Amino acid sequence: MLVAHWTFDLATVDGRRVADTAGAGLAAELDETAEIVPGRAGEALLLSGGGRAVIPATPQLVLSQVFGFSLAFFVQVTEQPVGVWRSLVYKPVAENDARGLGVWLYPDAMRVRVQLFTVKGPDYADSRARLAVGEWTHIAFVVDPDGMFLYVNGRLDGAVPLEHPVVTPTGPIYLGSEPGKPGFGGLLDDFRVYASALDEEAVRALAEDQDGP
């Protein structure tokens, strides 16, 4: 079930706020450096290394492993590795908590790491695929009661079983830099949150820019 969707098209932008098009009444707040610019299809979110958009914590965006959840988006990274981890998406267990869900770029390679925090500590999955600088890539992070799955351009790229319960991430969603750490430089588009675990067919449809579930 789709619970939130940000297209970043101009029709959804009001000042520094970007509306959710799924009808939940949510808004992403752009910081002073984030911009809305022409993108992949319509407009997209442009971020520098310190820029971010913040989606406030709400009950609709509490992500439960029991029911499963999914995050999906397009990203175009415009810089080479810079020697530090760079955040694409981050959602802490609670505001100002260092634990949570994350999607990062490797310090020394154009690979992606996804991570969840369980009751026994962090579990993560790394992509085998490498992103190409300046090209659009579709990323989907899917979680169900048994494991977490990383899809790159519609194909399953990494999967890790979850042996311990996930600590539910209930904090805000940060697109770009997380608090106190750098984010990536580039564009982000079509950010979706699902309160269910998407299957491979559904992820492929999103990556191929078809109508998703």
Image (tube, rainbow, N blue to C red):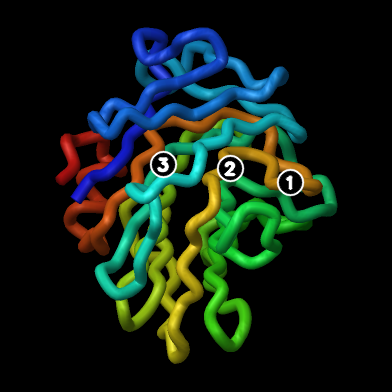
Q: Is residue 138 above or below residue 169?
A: above
Whichever of labels 2 and 1 marks the residue nearer the N terminus, that label is 2
Q: Amino acid at mark 2?
A: Tyr
The x, y position of residue 99, in whole percent, is 64, 67
Residue at 43%, 15% in the rendered image: 43
Whichever of labels 3 and 1 marks the residue nearer the N terminus, that label is 3
* Disc 2: which residue: 174
Residue at 41%, 9% in the rendered image: 10
In the figure, residue 93 lies in which quadrant? bottom right
Which residue in the rendered view is the most extreme toward the right? 83
* Disc 3: which residue: 73
Relative to 206, 33 lies left or right: right
In the figure, residue 18 lies in which quadrant? top left
Residue at 49%, 29% in the rendered image: 28
Relative to 59, 200 lies left or right: left
Mark drawn on residue 13: none
Mark drawn on residue 179: 1
User: Is residue 46 visible in the rendered structure shown here?
Assistant: yes
Contact? badges 2 and 1 (CB < 8 Å): yes
Whichever of labels 2 and 3 marks the residue nearer the N terminus, that label is 3
The x, y position of residue 158, in whole percent, is 44, 71
The x, y position of residue 115, in whole percent, is 56, 67
Residue at 53%, 24% in the rendered image: 45
Q: Amino acid at mark 1?
A: Pro
Q: Amino acid at mark 3?
A: Phe
Calculate the distance from the C-alpha at mark 2 to the C-alpha at mark 1.
8 Å
Check disc 1: other Cα within 10 Å, few if <14, some if 14-19, many if 20+.
some
Q: 180 or 50, which lies in front? A: 180
Calculate the distance from the C-alpha at mark 3 to the C-alpha at mark 1.
21 Å
The x, y position of residue 196, in whole percent, is 24, 60
Relative to 158, 11 lies left or right: left
Q: Secondary structure at mark 1?
A: loop
